[in-house]
Amino acid sequence: MTDPLMREKAPKEKSQQPALRQPRQGPTDEAQMAAAAALARLEQKQPRSRGPTSQDSIRNQVRKELQAEATSSCSPDATGTKIPEAKEEGSGHLAVTGVYFICPLTGATIRRDQRDTRIKEAITSHFTTDPVGASIMKIHTFNRDRERVKLGVDTIAKYLDNIHLHPEEEKYRKIKLQNKVFQERINCLEGTHEFLEAIGFQRLLLPVPDQEAPEEFYVLSEAALAQPESLERHKEQLVGAQPVRAQLDRQRRVFRPSSLAAQFDLPADFFNLSAEELKREQRLRSEAVERLSVLRTKAMREKEEQRELRKYTYTLLRVRLPDGCLLQGTFYARERLSALYQFVRESLLCDWLPFELLASGGHKLAEDDNVAFNECGLVPSALLTFSWDAAVLEDIRAAGTELDSSVLKPELLEATEKLS
């Protein structure tokens, strides 16, 4: 919770950017011109040098990497995620209380374990105002087998196409409920009956030739038949719809500078692991030093690490800003780096200026790298560093101006919290 009465002193480390020299304001014309000039030169950067190719140099490179990893793991600035042990709910100070989502229909914030229930409730309540739209959402959302949904939707679309092409032929306006195709493709899906009835089909018992007992049919009403445009519109809505999915709540938060920036105590929501798997994870971490002593290529070690990283569904990321403040957000472990760049850019006052994000050890994470968080070691949590593009900073300073070390939008700065 935000504690406006408590303030924490900024860490003694030097800020990467110059301090604020005058009241906060938008970029000057000179700054914009300087930044534009720097942007024009960004594409002229030299390509990275190739790695060693001979066997001896590769072995030397592996040794260097192992030593660097060992050093990094002992560094106080390295990201350390605490694997949650069995503890009572509410004990300790969690980095976040859990993983939350936003219902796209109501805008309500819901817990991870409430997603399906709350989405279904929202869709069901929608039937009173828009039965056609609600039934379409039900078909695409309540049924998990996407191939079966597509088959059923295509079959209903074929029914409606036949009616549109042959409006005078009565046989196309009737659907026998005990028909094998109807039973296998449509009756098995939730929401299909509601959709057919919402667009004008009526359930009737009709006589069947050479059969004593009548059978149940869906028969399109005369009123619905008289509005072919509506039928065509409903068909297009059905075919083009997508499942209603709760959107991950980023839980954007800003913290004051803290020595606890690299410490993460995560709730169980972040771990797609059982209690036994959590214990195994702790054992594997304790064996890290022993594994580093084995001479392996980087590719071999990365392959092994990827198997471990696939366990995580979510990741909590913090970005250390030039003034030491921390910007925090929750992401899917499979999301790409571009999602983090967008998240940071949406928080910046000068969102048009290029910037860089650096991982532990100073490794640059390029926005255009098509890499997921769980593919580059940023799960289940990580601390990154923000910096403006060096060329832009150089030209802005050459123009006789400076960028404010506080880079966030005012409304975010007002909600700054203490990290504890």
Image (spheres, rainbow, N blue to C red):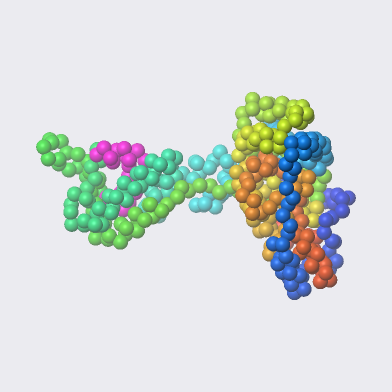
Q: Position of residue 221 (x, y in %)?
A: 23, 53
Residue visible at 19% across and 49% down in the picture:
171
Residue 383 quadrant: top right
Q: Residue furthest left?
A: 210
Q: Position of residue 248 (x, y in %)?
A: 58, 47
Task: Name the one closer to the observer, 263 or 96.
Answer: 263
Q: Which residues are magenta?
A: 179-201
Q: Position of residue 134 (x, y in %)?
A: 40, 50
Task: Name the one closer to the observer, 63 or 118.
Answer: 63
**Number of disc labels:** 0
Residue visible at 71% across and 35% down in the picture:
297
Quadrant of the image containing the C terminus: top right
Task: Name the one closer to the observer, 352 or 191.
Answer: 352
Asked whether the viewer can see residue 366, the reply is: yes
Residue visible at 74% across and 36% down in the picture:
55
Q: Position of residue 18 (x, y in %)?
A: 84, 61
Asked whether the viewer can see residue 194, the reply is: no
Does 110 sit above or below residue 211?
below
